[in-house]
Image: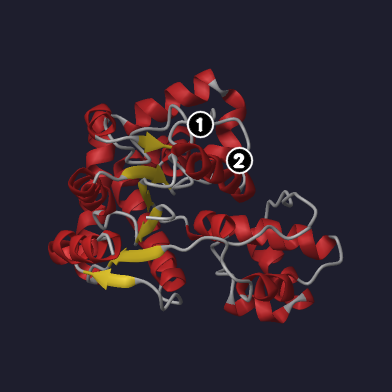
Amino acid sequence: MSQPFIAFLVGPTASGKSKIALELAQKHSMEIINADRMQVYRHLTIGTAKPSSEDFALVPHHLFDLIDPDQSFSAMDYATMAREVLNDQGQEKKYLFVGGSGFYLKALLYPPQDLPKGVAHIEDYVQAYRKILEKDPELKSTIHENDHYRIQRAFFLVSQGYTPSQLWKQAADQKPRLQVHWFGIQTPRPQLLTAIAHRSQTMVDQGLMEETQKVLEQFPASKPQLEKIIGYKQCLDAIENSSSMSNLVQEIARATGKYAKQQMTWFKRNPEILWSSLEHAQDSFSCYIEKETRPS
């Protein structure tokens, strides 16, 4: 192989990506690289469904537990560190990026634009969303009203005199800097919602509330970050309003379901993804990997 084999395994949260990734990595001697924006944070374990210590011991894992939860971390930071992993490990390796954070993968694939860094501090996202649409109506087709990070970023760019929709269209027209292979786990919506409900219950049973409290005590400045992460946000709400404790699992599951829908909307725009059900993913993706990495 003249260059490393690089695959992206994507799909909505709770679709079974981590399980399939571990199976593929073991079978094909691949190294797993995190592509989940929440799993880069240390101390956030239960609420991010991070791989276990046993999983970490089975195959090499990269880009997990990079920073404390009170630190900032951008998609460009991620892309820089991911490229370092690829450059340092050697061309004969096989890598499997795993996660649902499409904008992390996009930042890795396409050269960064020469734009000012920063996001706007927003208290009323409904009003902010309305304002950015007034300045740039085309954003309605690219930013969901609940996508708080992109609203923050778009609001900041608009305030600097830019037109975000044009910038992002230019970025979409760029050629990727890496040759990659896309795999996707596709799960029927009812089945996915069942899995999400089960995961939400499991996280609470495993001590998500206690983890949230511990992180908040150890890193008081992490609260704004925790408020952006599903699971921790609902725990913070419950801490401030004890009456919501009885609905904690349901609130986490509801928010996760909405997020999963946004993820699938984003990934379905990519015609390069080879989709498979969870049941057939291991065989389907294994056949593809064997074909692509077979010596010529």
The secondary structure type at the circle numbered 1 is loop
Secondary structure type for disc 2: loop
Answer above or below: position of 108 versus 268: above
169 or 61, which lies in front? 61
Give percent across and percent down for residue 291.
Answer: 23, 66
Q: Residues within 10 Å of mark 2 (few under 14, many from 20)?
A: some
> Label 2 is placed on what type of residue?
Phe
Residue in the picture at 51% in, 20% down: 217
Residue ID for mark 1: 66
Residue at 18%, 47% in the rendered image? 27
* Viewer-side residue, 252 vs 112: 112
Q: Residue at x 29, y 31 (%)?
A: 56
The residue located at (47%, 25%) in the rendering is 215
**Residue 146 occupies which quadrant of the picture?**
bottom right
Instruction: Tell which circle, 1 or 2, labels the residue nearer the N-terminal end.
Output: 1
Q: Which mark is residue 73?
A: 2
Taking 152 as reference, is 235 above or below it?
A: above
As displayed, is residue 44 above or below residue 227?
above
The answer to whether 249 appears left or right of 177 in the picture is left
Above or below, 190 relative to 229:
below
Tally of numbered tags = 2
Q: Amino acid at mark 1?
A: Leu
> Extreme front residue here?
296
Instruction: Give the Cα distance between marks 1 and 2.
Output: 9 Å
Q: Position of residue 287 (x, y in %)?
A: 18, 65
Answer with the quarter of the image where residue 255 lies. bottom left
